[in-house]
Image (cartoon, rainbow, N blue to C red):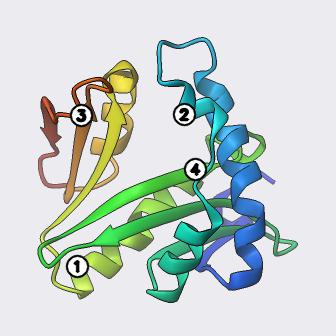
Amino acid sequence: MSTLTDYAVERATAAQIAASPAIEQAAAERFRGWNVPDAIVQEATPSSVLQAARAAGLLWVALDRGGDPVGFACVESAPQRVHHKELDVHPDHGRRGIGTALFRAVEHWAIASERGEVTLTTPNECQVLAPDFCWVSSQCRVRHVAPAAGSFPRAYPRPPLL
């Protein structure tokens, strides 16, 4: 499969959560060998966090034609913004627009829910990813966190889409 029409993005069900750790860990392999915190390549979002997000309507999943999860977006919501806690696509399905589709599904929900901003955080070592996320959305601010300091030293607002 090579086009986004081969995939669907929808709110996750409880049964679909079981695939998330394998998706997250496979996606994290992209960063093995980078100077990133070990947790990025060794840990997955706890099931309890995903279950709570699903129950709150804050977990989306990308499904292939067979209905199998190949990606997910887990967010947290505040009155004025939505923050991506995790957004992953299995590398076997990467570079096909699935991450963008997940991000846009969250963005559409955020706009409908009157949140003014969609954010995500990456370690400073992953700054190379900022342009990928900023070009996805006019609502997006990418914040890089210095792992030791835990601060937000950089934000990249994206100009409105034409």
Rounded to the nearest angstrom, the CA distance separating label 1 from label 2 is 29 Å
Callout 4, which amino acid? Asp
Q: Quadrant of the N terminus?
A: bottom right
Instruction: Determine whether the residue tagged by mark 4 lies in a helix, strand or loop.
Output: strand
In the image, residue 50 lies at what x, y percent?
57, 70
Rounded to the nearest angstrom, the CA distance separating label 1 from label 3 is 28 Å
Callout 1, which amino acid? Ile
Q: Earlier in the sequence, mark 4 or mark 3?
A: 4
Of residues 88 and 22, which is closer to you in this image?
Answer: 22
Q: Earlier in the sequence, mark 1 or mark 2?
A: 2
- Asked whether the residues under the numbered discs 2 and 3 touch, taking CB atoms below 8 Å apart as contact, a structural biologist would say no
Instruction: Determine whether the residue tagged by mark 3 lies in a helix, strand or loop.
Output: loop
Describe residue 130's horizontal placement relative to residue 68 as left or right: left
Rounded to the nearest angstrom, the CA distance separating label 4 from label 2 is 12 Å
Q: Nearer the viewer, mark 1 or mark 2?
A: 2
In the image, residue 122 lies at what x, y percent?
35, 36
Callout 2, which amino acid? Ile
Q: Which mark is residue 88?
A: 4
Instruction: Determine whether the residue tagged by mark 2 lies in a helix, strand or loop.
Output: helix
Rounded to the nearest angstrom, the CA distance separating label 4 from label 1 is 22 Å
- Asked whether the residues under the numbered discs 1 and 3 touch, taking CB atoms below 8 Å apart as contact, a structural biologist would say no
Figure check: 109 above or below 106: below
- Which residue is disc 2 drawn over? 40
Figure check: 141 above or below 69: above
* Image mark count: 4
Please tell me which residue is depicted at 29% across the width and 23% down the height of the picture: 148
In the image, residue 63 lies at what x, y percent?
72, 69
Instruction: Determine whether the residue tagged by mark 1 lies in a helix, strand or loop.
Output: helix
Please tell me which residue is depicted at 61% across the width and 40% down the height of the picture: 95
- Which residue is disc 3 drawn over? 150
- Asked whether the residues under the numbered discs 4 and 2 touch, taking CB atoms below 8 Å apart as contact, a structural biologist would say no
- Which residue is disc 1 drawn over? 111
